[in-house]
Image (spheres, rainbow, N blue to C red):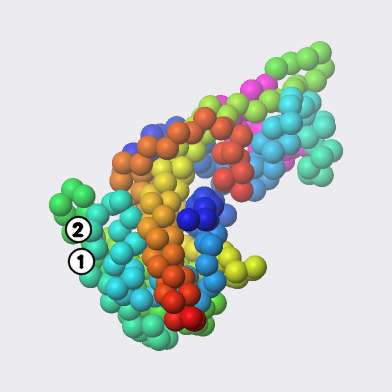
Amino acid sequence: MARAATTSDAFNAVAEPRRRQILDLLSGGELPVHDLVTRLGLAQPLVSKHLRVLREVGLVDVRDDGRQRRYRVNGRPLQPVHDWVKAYEGSWAHRFDRLDTVLDELKERERRDGQ
Amino acid sequence: MASSGLAAVTLPTDTQICITRAFDAPRRLVYEAWTTPELIMRWWGGDRGVMTLAEVDLTVGGRWRYVMTANGGFEVAFHGVFSEVVPEERLVSTEIFEAMPDEQAVATTTFAEADGRTTLTILVQHSSRAARDGHVASGMEAGMNESMDHLDRVVASLR
């Protein structure tokens, strides 16, 4: 199959809705962990657990800033997943383009029949 | 001809694929094109091959079967059985790729019309994530080559 191991890893990581929510929050920019905890309304250990999974597949980067750990998103590992979904989308797009042509003919037929 | 919009593929859960597309036509026509064998023959193969058979028994318990000669010269066939048929609104059917007869997906297709345009939504429920992933990968192997630089769309596409 065309999928690389990293795809599967990143894929696992984003299969969990809370982790997608974390990525959404971080897409606005770097955040300290306590901000994530507040915005998610989850217990800190649970947030830390999700962040660990995201970090292990490279979807977030972390740095220490004084007493705080600040997280930011790193989209690179998702590129293969993205490519994979886009390619699938492309194969449907070709089908739908042909369907458009068929529909144009059906519309033309209705116009003729309506006259 | 009026542009009808881009196909959008999302992965709502780890066992599903959802495909959405708007068409510049009323839904009675989209439904007709979607369910009439001689019309299916003309579009379903896309650029992946040439259709050689389309059979559709559009009744609950009725069977459909599509066969295509793919660009590689090999034959691919799919079939399924309808479990819901609400004309011009909703179709539910199983979907089996005959090369992998043990993997059965369930596709729910809905047709929604607004202002003379129709939004088609196909939600495919696979039996496992591996089966879903294999299905998407098969689309990739068809050799599509889209330009894709917008990583921010990734998160959205996976929502």
| Label 1 with label 2: CB-CB less than 8 Å | yes
Q: What x and y, as percent, mark residue B1?
A: 48, 56
The chain containing the residue under callout 1 comes to B
Residue at 44% in and 70% down: A108
State yes or no: residue B56 in magenta: no
Q: What x and y, as percent, mark residue A61?
A: 64, 23
Q: Residues within 10 Å of mark 1 (few under 14, many from 20)?
A: some
Question: Going by the picture, which residue comes out furthest to the left?
Answer: B73
Looking at the image, which is closer to me, A63 or B28? B28
Looking at the image, which is closer to me, B91 or B155? B91
Which kind of residue does numbered mark 1 sit on? Answer: Thr
Residue at 46% in and 42% down: A86
State yes or no: residue A59 in magenta: yes
Question: Going by the picture, which residue comes out furthest to the top?
Answer: A66
Residue at 78% in and 15% down: A65
Q: Earlier in the sequence, mark 1 or mark 2?
A: 1
Residue range (magenta): A44-62
Q: Quadrant of residue B99?
A: bottom left
Q: Residues within 10 Å of mark 2 (few under 14, many from 20)?
A: some
Residue B52, which numbered label? 1
Q: From this viewpoint, is residue B39 visible?
A: yes
The chain containing the residue under callout 2 comes to B
Q: What secondary structure is the magenta-colored segment mainly?
A: helix
Q: From this viewpoint, is residue B130 visible?
A: no
Residue B69, which numbered label? 2
Label 2 element class: strand
Residue B109, which numbered label? none
Looking at the image, which is closer to me, B23 or B146? B23
Question: Going by the picture, which residue comes out furthest to the front?
Answer: A115
